[in-house]
Amino acid sequence: MRQELRIPTRPVEIDLGLCRVLLAVAVATGVLLAAVPVLAHHSRAMFDMSKNITYQGVVKDFRWQNPHSQIVIMIGSGAADPSTAGTWTVEASDIKLMSAMGWTPKTYKAGDPITVVAHPNRGASNLVLLFYAIKADDTRLYRATHRYPEEKE
């Protein structure tokens, strides 16, 4: 024999004012959270833009990519500046900016000798920001057309 289970129900009152406030808070939180990576992405605070360090080595990898191309370089222990010995990731700009400055996907390949002038990382990281590269014919390839206020040659 089956028995039916009856659950007493009563009308639920919804406070529309509270719903609107909660929705506004949720939307504002979403907008703020979405903006944080964009703001952090464009920050140069991690680099000392007032300093230029010259890195002379060999290209390990040239990554022609967005949002930032990268050049991975290896510098031997016999470097003129011993503080530059090691493997460095040199962050550059996006493909559009670099193309406008004369860069191509074939500008560098693994094994090519390279000289870059870059802004060092304020921390202990081997990630540095490209200012410009010096080609074998002594021409300079800049990261971008714009300069940051503290960026000096």
Image: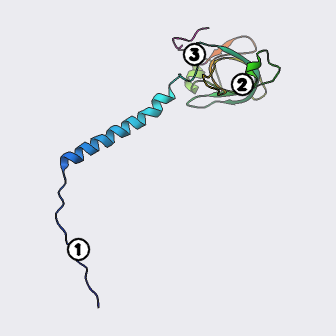
Classify mark 2: helix, strand or loop. Answer: loop
Place of residue 54 in the rendered image (x, y in percent of width and height, measured from the top left)? 70, 15
Q: Residue at x 79, y 27 (%)?
A: 111
Q: Name the foreground residue: 40 vs 137.
A: 40
Pointers 1 and 2 in contact (CB under 8 A)?
A: no
Residue at mark 2: 108
Q: Give, as a three-letter code, the residue at label 1.
A: Ile
Outermost residue toward the right in this view: 78
Residue at mark 3: 49
Q: Is label 2 or label 3 in front?
A: 3
Label at residue 7: 1
Q: Is label 1 or label 2 in front?
A: 1
Earlier-in-chain disc, 2 versus 3? 3
Q: Residue at x 55, y 30 (%)?
A: 67
Residue 114 visible in the current orientation: no
Place of residue 109 in the rendered image (x, y in percent of width and height, measured from the top left)? 74, 28
Number of disc labels: 3
Q: Is residue 150 magenta?
A: yes
Query: In which quadrant of the rendered image does the N terminus lie?
Result: bottom left
Q: Name the foreground residue: 2 vs 101.
A: 2
Instruction: Give the residues drawn in magenta, as a range.
Output: 143-153
Q: Give, as a three-letter code, the residue at label 2.
A: Tyr
Give the dominant element type of the magenta stretch: helix, strand or loop: loop
